[in-house]
Amino acid sequence: MPLFAVHAIDRPDVLPTRLDYYAAHRAFVEDQETQGITVIASGPLQSDDGEIMTGSLFILEACSRAAIDNFVANDPFTVQGIWGEVRISRFHPRKGKILAV
């Protein structure tokens, strides 16, 4: 199955809302196996000092781009307007631990 990279940047000044919905977002991500999506890697993007979450990055395995679009559309961070720009790209690993997939 193909891999996809999802790079989501938070809208400005949305950190308090992000924190309010963080548990719902985590639960949603943890439930993706039941939706046919394997989470290879995920985590928050951070400010350079590591103090502030500024977005999210995922490497996901799914049968189709449509499944990834559905994942993004239904994530609580999308639903609550936390993410601003979201870029989705098919990903082909060349080097690193992810090659074990």
Image (tube, rainbow, N blue to C red):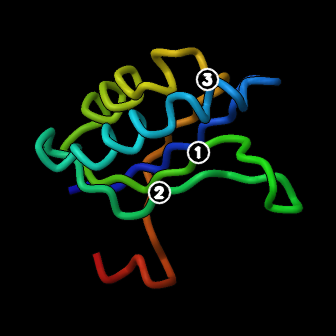
Residue 50 in which image quadrant: bottom right
Amino acid type at mark 1 = Ser
Residue in view at x 35 percent, y 63 percent: 40
Residue under circle 1?
56
Q: Residue furthest right?
A: 49
- Per the image, label 2 sits on a secondary structure element best described as strand
Amino acid type at mark 3 = Ile
The relative height of residue 34 versus residue 80 in the rendered view (above or below) is below
Q: Earlier in the sequence, mark 2 or mark 1?
A: 2
Q: Earlier in the sequence, mark 2 or mark 3?
A: 2
Distance (Cα) linking label 2 and label 1: 7 Å
Where the C terminus falls, by quadrant? bottom left
- Along the line of sight, which residue is nearer the eye, 94 or 46? 46
Residue in view at x 56 percent, y 29 percent: 20
Residue 58 locus on image (x, y percent): 47, 52
Residue 79 - label:
none
Residue in view at x 27 percent, y 28 percent: 66
Residue under circle 2?
42
- Per the image, label 1 sits on a secondary structure element best described as strand
Mark 2 and mark 1 residues within 8 Å of each other at the beta carbon: yes
